[in-house]
Amino acid sequence: MATTKTDPKLALTANGNKKTKFYEGLTREQLIQAYRLMYTSRRIDDREILLKRQQKIFFQMSGAGHEAIGVAAGLALKSGYDWFYPYYRDRALCLALGVEPYNMFLQGVGAADDPSSGGRQMPSHWSYPALHIVTQSSPTGSQILQAVGCSEGGRYFSRHPKAAEIPASAADYRQFKNVSFQGDEVTYVSLGDGTSSEGEFWEALNAAALGKLPVIFCVEDNGYAISVPVEVQTAGGSISRLVSGFPNFHFEEVDGTDPVASYAAFARAAKYCREGHGPAFVHAHVIRPYSHSLSDDERLYRPDTERERDAQRDPVTRTQMFLLREGILDDKGITQLEKEVEAELQIAVDRALEALPPAPESVMNFIYSPDIDATSSAFETQAAAEPPEGKDGKKPAAKTMADLITATLRDEMKRDERIVIFGEDVADCSREEYLRQKLVKGKGGVFKLTFGLQCEFGNDRVFNSPLAEAAIVGRATGMATRGLKPVVEIQFFDYIWPAMMQIRDELSVIRWRSNNGFSCPVVIRVAIGGYLTGGAIYHSQCGESIFTHIPGLRVVFPSNSLDAAGLLRTAVRCDDPVLFLEHKRLYRESYGRSAYPGPDYMIPFGKAKIVQPGTDLTVVTYGAVVPRALQAAQKLEREQGVKVELIDLRSLNPFDWDAIAASVAKTNRVLVAYEDTLSWGYGAEIAARIADQLFDKLDAPVRRVAAKDVFVAYQPILEDAILPQPNDLYLAMKELSEY
Ligand SMILES: Cc1ncc(C[n+]2csc(CCOP(=O)(O)OP(=O)(O)O)c2C)c(N)n1
Ligand SMILES: [Mg+2]
């Protein structure tokens, strides 16, 4: 660990010798270039502000005051080689990495040709795949964990270079994920001082320190988060002080309005990371001269005296003075440079104002992969022939859902070295020596579904994560952006919520918001559901409709072993993010066991299974309600002769509307049954759609059976009363059939 601190009150770093050729390693030409970039950045902000006032663009976010630290980072790091997760004030960094001003204006006007998003994102939400600038979102801080995952991805490929190759036979996501990596690459991520209060920031620092990862965290501290000053935001007022206890880090605290000192800080940080010592933290003191955004007026909460004090540290004016003082440029040279920039920006603005907007018909493009359609027949493969009978004439025992999920993971890991598995407790044993010395057998997950995988594939590929769900999903997202296929586990659905921001605002939308520039096809396996007699409130939750409501996320929910194997393989090989819901009660149930269908068995998403055909009533369900509904249907047929057609949806997003419509056209009566709470649940959408599109086919109202609108209680008598039981299903089916 090393710390370098520059007093932010010091004057701009200078050699005091006009004849010198280098300033902390920067040549005079590089300093002129740095000034050109800083000036360009500031003038783009000014132009955008004007355009916004003229209502020619729709939003403005300035990088003013942050130019020096941005340019310094751009000079110290390598565009298209290192990886970048900048935040919205990093305009100067992006310019230094090679983004054209024209492209920035294209984003402002929301043009079809805007390379960051094709008009989908606000300006200053950078995304430039060729430059390794990864698509940025608006939630402050959600980029930080992804940067950690990105750096882990680079390290993984360096250690497993064969994984980066694309086998000719790989009919899967790898065909569309070209991988590049460098042994000494660095990942840059930046954030504001306010954002350092987000929990994900701390999860990211912890993960980077644990893994000694080559990530540079840059906090651009302008003293405010909109109107909230740093002393209200950060205990003690200094983020440097708070993070100083993290091991394996190199720390820098620097005047971020001084490009030379900032460059030196970044150069030291990058060297430390490239040499493999661990992550670095650059705390840059900057200013924010243009209010938070155009929607904010800082005079409401900052007096003139304070604003004037800041203005004296303006990085653009200070750098100009520095060039003059050092004799690097004279007045004429400065004027000439500024004229050139103005002329360049005028051309860029004029061109951008003529750019065409995106076509309204394009809005649905790139929600999912345009390359691999996980609903297509390419994913409809036959199960291998049943294994032969043994010598005793008996068939081998049918396998549980838990067995087949493990078998599928094992076969996919053999087939594809890009698959990594991590989560809480998923490894056999983090202290490998215990396994080597055969002192322990290993755990492999609280439900043991990943048992044996670390021993077989090594702890690079199967490992325990800290207890931090946002970190699990955020890191996986960063890894998948680089071309890995993380198959992560959320131990209980009840604890998925810390990861919600990553799932809803990042994972599911990265492809769409970057206009197909980036993608992150992660698989999240989640143990879900109740009927556990004792699971209680926090080990029984469902809540799938909260996730089926998210565009861009595939949601599947198998009810039996064979479907679990087929759908999991599709999830792993496809090119979209998938939430794979595994019902805990079904893991080892005797219902729905089967033989392993072989290493290539797949089921396309969006195809329901007719569990039993019928003519009198349709029941649409999934998950643990399937065996309960079957039991009820069989009783109804025995007692009343009513033939129920039972549909197991298996995939919840997309879902098999055709199967529902065909069945309802035949039976004219339909019950939708699910384990989650009744109101606003998954069945509401199905029922609404049936009412809308199949109204003339119905002889009875659409009915639902689901859990009561309450949490799942511990005492089994209460649990039974809360969750839908076979008898509830039976009564509803009977009533509907008699309607
Ligand atoms: C998670 C989240 N919460 C709130 C906001 C609204 N918001 C946008 S910027 C901002 C302040 C950020 O301050 P800081 O991190 O210091 O960055 P600065 O803008 O000062 O550079 C807030 C509260 C947001 N975008 N994301
Ligand atoms: Mg701030």
Image (cartoon, rainbow, N blue to C red):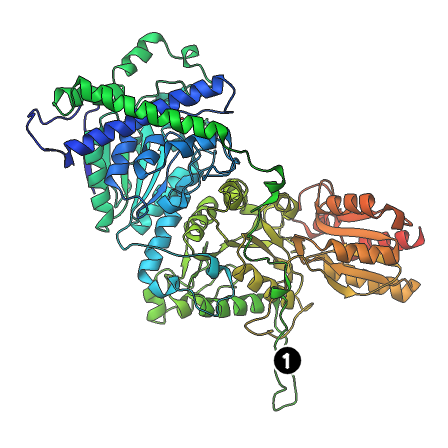
In the depicted structure, whether residue 696 falls above or below residue 236: below
In the rendered image, residue 242, in percent from the top left (x then y), is placed at 31, 33
Q: Specify the farthest residue to the top.
A: 304
Specify whether residue 283 is in view: no
In the rendered image, residue 294, in percent from the top left (x then y), is placed at 46, 19
Tell me if 653 is positioned left or right of 295 in this view: right
In the rendered image, residue 642, in percent from the top left (x then y), is placed at 90, 62
Question: Which of the two residues, 353 or 221, is positioned nearer the viewer here?
Answer: 353
For the point 60% across and 52% down, which residue is it? 554
Tell me if 37 is positioned left or right of 371 in this view: left
Tell me if 619 is positioned left or right of 271 in this view: right
Q: Residues within 10 Å of mark 1 (few under 14, many from 20)?
A: few
Q: Quadrant of residue 606?
A: bottom right
Question: Which of the two residues, 39 or 340, is positioned nearer the viewer here?
Answer: 340
For the point 20% across and 37% down, which residue is it? 3
For the point 67% across and 58% down, which residue is it? 650
Residue occupied by mark 1: 386
